Image (cartoon, rainbow, N blue to C red):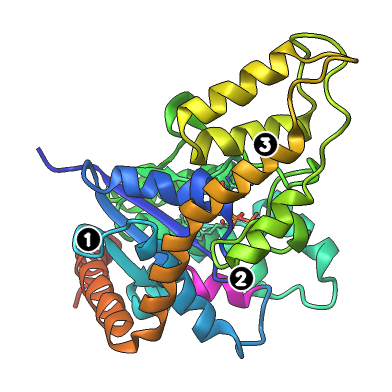
Amino acid sequence: MAKEVVLSGIRPTGFLHLGNYFGAMRNYVRMQDEYNCYFFVANWHSLTTHPDTKELQSAVHRVVAENVACGLDPEKVSLYVQSDVPEIAELYLYLNMLAYKGELEKTTSFKDKVRLQPENINAGLLTYPVLMAADILIHRAVKVPVGKDQEQHLEMARNFAQRFNHRYGEVLPEPQAFNFGGELVKILSLDGEGKMSKSENQLNTLYLADSDELLRKKIMKAKTDQGPLEPNSIKPAYIENLFTLMKLVSNPDTYSKFEADFAASSTGNCIIRYGDMKKQLAEDMVQFITPIREKAAAIQEDKNLLARIIKTGAEKARESAHATLNEVRKAIGMNY
Ligand code: ADP
Ligand code: TRP
């Protein structure tokens, strides 16, 4: 049986962090054997909010390098750059004729961005969900691994696909967001305030590109308190987050020891030592991130390798995109 098609995209708008790793990239890597996977760098999308392209090329290279360093195998998946696949732009054009101004203006991400950049409310921003639908539908992908914030965009992609099929005939399957069962992890910022994210709060975010020293410094400064007041207390979010991180990167015995220390602690009998816990976590984090950082840096410096990965990815993606576009043109009657 043919493998199901999976697609996801990452905007090259900042350094990737531990939240991206455990929330997205680790899952991409897990999917690469079971599915026919397409992963791409959404550089057209980044122009809707970041018109200055001085840093764009290095950001695109970094996203590709970091994804490969995290375990994506460019032989197994198609890892490509959006602008290398012009077929997407043609499908975007057709879908734009099926998207209504009213529904685009009501999209949550559009309203957020209007507030954030009132001086640059461009048409690309308004039609962001149409381009995203084209990204997905061009490979007739059915599973799209994304976070909760993208669910509205997925719903719009299904609507555009439905309208197309209704008007021109069944060509485009309806894609669903894919959430990895109960295993969704959310990594909080090290101060426990909100999620770890690309652009906010750099000292409380662990980036895959951080040096050992910086990782240690950030973790040692992570928020803690004087310890639990009574045995088996519920952990505050910032403490829970340290345990989450430890569970992800430390060995299970280490995690269990600190878990038991926490459960046994109370006022006047504080067994858990957060300083020791953070020191251990920092060392385990360094062990975890260093190989990824070093591998990513080596790939980023090897321009020939990068070019090869990006070219192979584009070839695979264009083959699939071309096949869909043929069907689309035939259905519309634009095959002369
Ligand atoms: P950011 O908020 O850092 O800009 P994006 O919105 O580009 O990240 O998200 C890229 C992917 O990483 C998405 O699939 C998202 O669900 C995941 N992700 C981002 N931040 C976190 C986090 N703190 N914890 C878990 N997953 C995250
Ligand atoms: N909008 C997504 C984000 O902000 C990025 C993206 C663009 C995407 N096109 C996509 C994700 C297609 C999944 C599928 O994170």
How packed is label 1: few (under 14 Cα within 10 Å), some, or many (20 or more)? some
Marks 2 and 1 in Cβ contact (< 8 Å): no
Give the x, y percent position of residue 270: 81, 20
Which amino acid lies under the numbered mark 2 shown in the image of this protein? Thr
Specify whether 323 is left or right of 6: left
Give the label, 2 or 1, closer to the camera: 2
Task: Compute the Cα span from label 3 to label 2.
Answer: 33 Å
Label 1: which secondary element: helix
Marks 3 and 1 in Cβ contact (< 8 Å): no
User: What main secondary structure does the magenta stretch of the protein show?
Assistant: helix
Instruction: Tell me the residue at 51%/75% (across/down).
Output: 43
The residue under label 2 is 13
Instruction: Tell me the residue at 50%/57% (across/down).
Output: 289
The residue under label 1 is 327
Whichever of labels 3 and 2 marks the residue nearer the N terminus, that label is 2
Q: Taking 116 as reference, is 7 above or below it?
A: above
For label 2, being within 8 Å of ligand 1 is answered yes
Query: Which range of residues does the magenta coloring cover?
Result: 41-48
Q: Nearer the viewer, residue 229 or 94?
A: 229
Q: Taking 27 as reference, is 56 above or below it?
A: below
The residue under label 3 is 277
Task: Compute the Cα span from label 2 to label 1.
Answer: 33 Å
Task: Compute the Cα span from label 3 to label 1.
Answer: 58 Å
Whichever of labels 2 and 1 marks the residue nearer the N terminus, that label is 2
Give the x, y percent position of residue 212: 59, 63
